[in-house]
Image: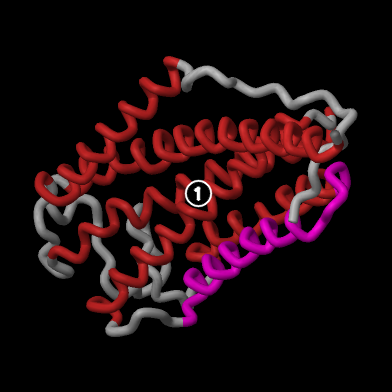
Amino acid sequence: MTALPRTDAPLPAIETRPAPRRLTILTVVTILAIAFGLYMALGYAGTDVEQGNVQRIFYIHMPSFFGAFFAFGAAVIGGIQYLRTRQDKWDTLALAGIEVGLALSLVNLVTGMIWARPIWNTWWTWDPRLTSAAIMVLTYAAYLMLRNGIENPERQKRFAAVYGILAFSTVIITLVIIRIRPDTIHPAVIGPSPQNAQGTFELQATAGVGAALGINFIVWSILVPWTLVWHRVRLENFTQRINALKARLLDT
């Protein structure tokens, strides 16, 4: 359980007004972009000649991983900046990045399992890529447990910053393992694949695949994580304000 702030500490800065106009616009654009991306995936792109309609899940499966990549990257920036400046806003960014990245990683894992069932005839296999992705998710889930297990706020933020930076190594491993492990059966969709993967497809094989994948990469790799991180930062600021006010009320 997170410790309440000291009662003599200044109240954390927080935006008590409605969401900034830029965030509101970004949220609307993101929602519309998700809808358009789904149209491109489900309606515009042709049906894959080998995999059928289950291939369409790749338009969310792949981009969601890169969305997690960028969110975890924001957590690394937040961790480094917190260790350098000791400013709470950077710890808040790191926390938001890891929570959003973890959510997108779970989307990546679940959609991958849905694809694997009809293609590989199994929900899960201990393929190197799948195993590294699972380790990545568990590593970042442990980050949240670490934060909740340390009561001292300063120590909590310091340890979390270091852990968040080191945990990014699991993201890098998951990203490159398909290129360095020849025994993986996980398909390399973009670029040449060094292995004989089952269920692979090239971007040019089916009409509209490239356009649909490109649009959804923009949506799930950029717009979705950016929007969610911004909202999560505001929510964390609000939570810190409430905890500070609660501590002062309990002290009176």
At horizontal 44% and vertical 17% (from top left) the residue drawn is 22
Task: State whether residue 211 is above or below residue 98.
Answer: above
Residue 206 left/right relative to 127: left
Q: State the extent of the magenta-drawn residues as a range.
A: 126-155
At horizontal 89% and vertical 29% (from top left) the residue drawn is 8
Task: State whether residue 123 is above or below residue 92.
Answer: below
At horizontal 50% and vertical 49% (from top left) the residue drawn is 68
Disc 1 secondary structure class: helix
Q: Position of residue 115 (x, y in %)?
A: 28, 69
* Outermost front residue: 252
State which quadrant residue 29 falls in: top left
How many numbered marks have been drawn onto this rendered protein structure?
1
Residue 128 left/right relative to 89: left
Q: Amino acid at mark 1?
A: Ala
Quadrant in which the C terminus is drawn: top right
Task: State whether residue 48 is above or below residue 159.
Answer: below
- Colour convention: secondary structure
Front residue of this view, candidates 207 and 71: 71
Q: Position of residue 11 (x, y in %)?
A: 77, 25
Examine the structure image and report whether residue 140 is included in the region drawn in magenta.
Answer: yes
Whether residue 81 can be seen here: no
Front residue of this view, candidates 31 and 211: 31
State which quadrant residue 197 falls in: bottom left
Whether residue 60 can be seen here: yes
Report the residue marked by disc 1: 68
Quadrant in which the N terminus is drawn: bottom right
Task: State whether residue 228 is above or below residue 109.
Answer: above
